[in-house]
Amino acid sequence: MGKLVNKIAVVTGAAQGIGARIVERLFVDGATIAALDVNLEKLQETVLQLDRSGERVFALQCNVSDREEVNAVFAKIYERFGKIDILVNNAGITRDAFFHKMTLEQWHSVINVNLNSMFYTCQAVIPNMRQQEYGKIVNISSSSSWGNMGQANYSAAKAGVIGLTRTLAKENGSKNITVNAVAPGHIDTEMTKTIPENIKMMAIMLTPAGRMGNPEEVASVVSFLSSDDSSYVNGECISVSGGYLMP
Ligand SMILES: NC(=O)c1ccc[n+]([C@@H]2O[C@H](COP(=O)([O-])OP(=O)(O)OC[C@H]3O[C@@H](n4cnc5c(N)ncnc54)[C@H](O)[C@@H]3O)[C@@H](O)[C@H]2O)c1
């Protein structure tokens, strides 16, 4: 029996990359999953590959930077399953530019998708989690939260994620809710495919593991933080960076 049998999980940004592998891992762990993404076509393809039976993974279109949409989709999930035990906030984008050239649109879009979205999704689940006295929230941050050239918007959002995580952990720990973050380093996904080869090589040189990470290596840590194996872990940010991040 998987450790997440009878648990209802929501994963955002689930159509590809790290999000898709998180859905896959929680599925193997036994959870029933509402998989959310703004790209419905890609999401449906992925969900079909992960759960051919269509019984435990459900695709729902949701732009997490739109509060109305988030509220409507989470209301649907509550209507269907009656509860949410696990929330994984994974959806994210980059719009890189040096700060002196960054447009207001680049700034706002990254803050909206990577940080404001977590205000919406967490507010949609925390009142119920407090009532049921059970909840696991995992927020995806990044090694860029320590600062990264060309990513003032992304770094600010991902550092904000850690502050939000710690505060929610303090506020809700007494209600048997844990809120933790995961900070991936350089992971091989669509997001990192556009990074120039020389920059990637430099990042790998600074990574003791000597390679990029796989999305599955992030998903296994999310699985741990989503289960009772981590019942006394709260307010942490765990780096999954092959040693790149040793603050
Ligand atoms: N790949 C890395 O090296 C790396 C490193 C650190 C952190 N991260 C973080 O991990 C998470 C996943 O990244 P990834 O590498 O898998 O990226 P990805 O681009 O492969 O996947 C991101 C997914 O999020 C979805 N998404 C984007 N905007 C959305 C929105 N408004 N609403 C709902 N869904 C939306 C996309 O459609 C896509 O399916 C992100 O939060 C990212 O910032 C990635």
Image: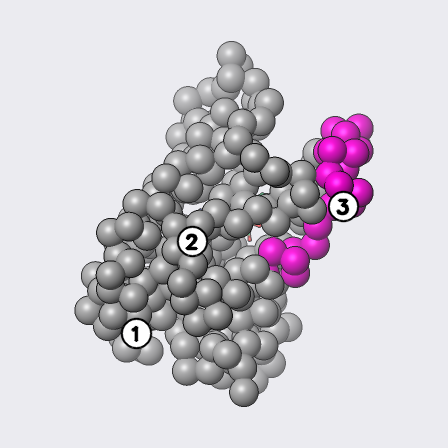
Quarter assignment of residue 74: bottom left
Residue in the foreground of this view, choosing between 228 and 70: 228
Mark 2 and mark 1 lie on one chain; the one further toward the N terminus is 1
Give the residue at x 43% y 59%.
233
Q: Residue at x 40, y 63 (%)?
A: 232
Residue 144 on the magenta segment? no
User: Quarter-wise, where is residue 183 in the image?
Assistant: top right
Q: Which residue lies under the disc numbered 1?
A: 83
Q: Is mark 2 within 8 Å of ligand 1?
A: no
Location of mark 3 (residue): 209
Magenta stretch in the rendered image? 198-219
Mark 1 secondary-structure assignment:
loop
Q: Distance from label 3 to label 1 (Cα)? A: 40 Å
41 relative to 205, above or below: below
Tag 3–tag 1 contact (CB < 8 Å): no
Q: Earlier in the sequence, mark 3 or mark 1?
A: 1
* Tag 2: amino acid: Asn
On the picture, is 64 further left or further right than 68?
Answer: right
- Percent position of residue 1, x then y: 54, 87
Name the residue at 50% across, 34% down.
Answer: 145
Q: Which mark is residue 180?
A: 2
Closer to the eye: label 3 or 1: 3
